[in-house]
Amino acid sequence: MTDPNTEAYHPFIETGGADEHIVLEDCEIDARTHDSDKASELHTHDETHIIFIRTGEMHWEVGDEEFHATPGDTIVTPPTTEHKFEVIGDKPSKTLCLIAPARRVEDQGPSGTHEITKPDDI
């Protein structure tokens, strides 16, 4: 028996380490490869982000907490919570990020990315 509610969705496939992005009705899924020298600035999002660490190691700061994340770990960034990350070591880190609720397409930037809000912009 197939679920008629899933027929409109496209399969989520990661190919060759390329970043992938899919928007479902209520959430988005982002598969990313972060290079070994990647570090983000302190920023916020209007949505909840749930990040699953698949490969590599990352240092995360979420609010007042800090985490050393390795494969199998999950990081949650609630809406409007300041956070940043840095890839640790000489290997890239692959993550899978669930974003809820889904953002409007016009709020997303090029290639499925989106604008982030830096603390100075708040």
Image: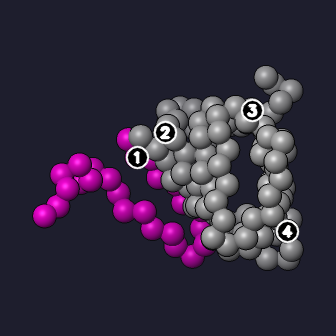
Residue that label 2 marks: 102
Disc 2 from disc 4: Cα separation: 29 Å
In the displayed structure, 44 sits above or below 37; it is above
The amino acid marked with disc number 3 is Thr
Position of residue 101 in the picture relative to residue 6 (left or right): right
Magenta residue check for 16: yes
Disc 2 on helix, strand or loop? loop
- The total number of labels drawn is 4
Say left or right for 111 vs 57. Answer: left
Where, by quadrant of the figure, is residue 32 drawn?
Answer: bottom right
Element type where label 4 sits in the image = strand
In the rendering, which numbered label is found on residue 24? 1
Residue range corresponding to the magenta coloring: 1-25
Q: Which residue is mark 3?
A: 117
Between marks 4 and 1, how big is the CA–CA gap?
A: 31 Å
In the depicted view, which residue is nearer to us: 59 or 41? 59
Could you tell me how far apart the alpha carbons at marks 4 and 3 are, in whole angstroms? 24 Å
| Label 1 with label 2: CB-CB less than 8 Å | yes
Label 4 neighbour load within 10 Å: few <14, some 14-19, many 20+: many
On the image, the x and y values in percent for residue 75 come to: 67, 55
* Mark toward the start of the polypeptide (2 vs 4): 4
SS of the residue at dot 3? loop
Measured in 3D between alpha carbons, the distance from the residue under mark 3 to the one under mark 1, in whole angstroms, is 23 Å
- Residue holding disc 4: 88
Structural crowding at the residue carrying mark 3, measured as other residues with C-alpha within 10 Å and reported as few (<14), some (14–19) or many (≥20):
some
Q: Is residue 94 left or right of residue 25?
A: right
* Of the pair 16 and 36, the residue shown nearer to us: 36
- Is 34 drawn above or below residue 109 in the view shown? below
Asked where in the image residue 92 lies, by quadrant, the reply is bottom right
- Identify the element where label 1 is drawn: loop
